Image (tube, helix red, strand yellow):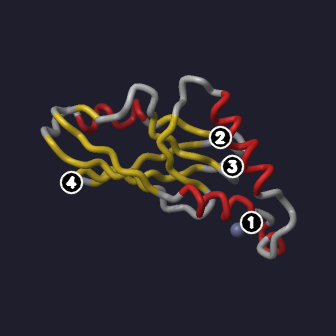
Amino acid sequence: MIKELRVKTENKYEMVDLTANIRELVKEVKEGILTLYTPHTTAAIIINENTDTNISKDIFNCFGRLIPEGTWLHDAVDNNATAHIKASLLGPSETIPIQNGKLLLGTWQSPMLVELDGPKERKVILQIQ
Ligand code: ZN
């Protein structure tokens, strides 16, 4: 089964927790794997903590120090080279095991869309196998 979510981001950098969107989807699944995939080159999917929102701020601040804006060849095209680099480091997908209708996430884990060049409308493809 494949389902597509549309996520509207509101900021240049933003993490959107997808947990609520996918819990309902897996509740009838006895055992399987959920893949979350975003078909974009300036957004990513990660699993990390969303309870302390300072973590997402720290991740974006870290990336800002490691991969500064305005110094890359691709900036001549559409001025978003850092977003492409950050997205390639984070990756476009994650997988989560499912058992008895539940995602086998750790207590502090949340699957999130990472916006790196927003605001935009992003697609997230969900596939259960
Ligand atoms: Zn670009």
- Mark 1 sits near ligand 1, with its Cβ under 8 Å away: yes
Residue at the (58%, 49%) spot, across then down: 121
Mark 4 lies on a secondary structure that is: loop
Query: Against 69, is 111 above or below?
Result: above
Residue at the (40%, 30%) spot, across then down: 20
Q: Which residue is mark 3?
A: 118
In the image, taking residue 2 as reference, residue 89 lies left or right, namely: right
In the rendered image, residue 57, in percent from the top left (x then y), is placed at: 70, 35
**Label placed on residue 129:** 4
Nearest to N terminus: mark 2 or mark 1: 2
Residue at the (63%, 59%) spot, across then down: 42
Mark 3 lies on a secondary structure that is: loop
Label 3, label 2: how far apart the Cα atoms are: 8 Å
Q: Quadrant of the C terminus?
A: bottom left
Label 2, label 1: how far apart the Cα atoms are: 17 Å
Nearest to N terminus: mark 3 or mark 2: 2
Mark 1 lies on a secondary structure that is: helix
Asked which quadrant contains residue 70, the reply is bottom right
Q: Which residue is mark 1?
A: 81
Three-letter amino acid code at disc 3?
Answer: Gly
Three-letter amino acid code at disc 4?
Answer: Gln
Q: Which residue is mark 2?
A: 14
Label 2, label 4: how far apart the Cα atoms are: 29 Å
Label 1, label 3: how far apart the Cα atoms are: 13 Å
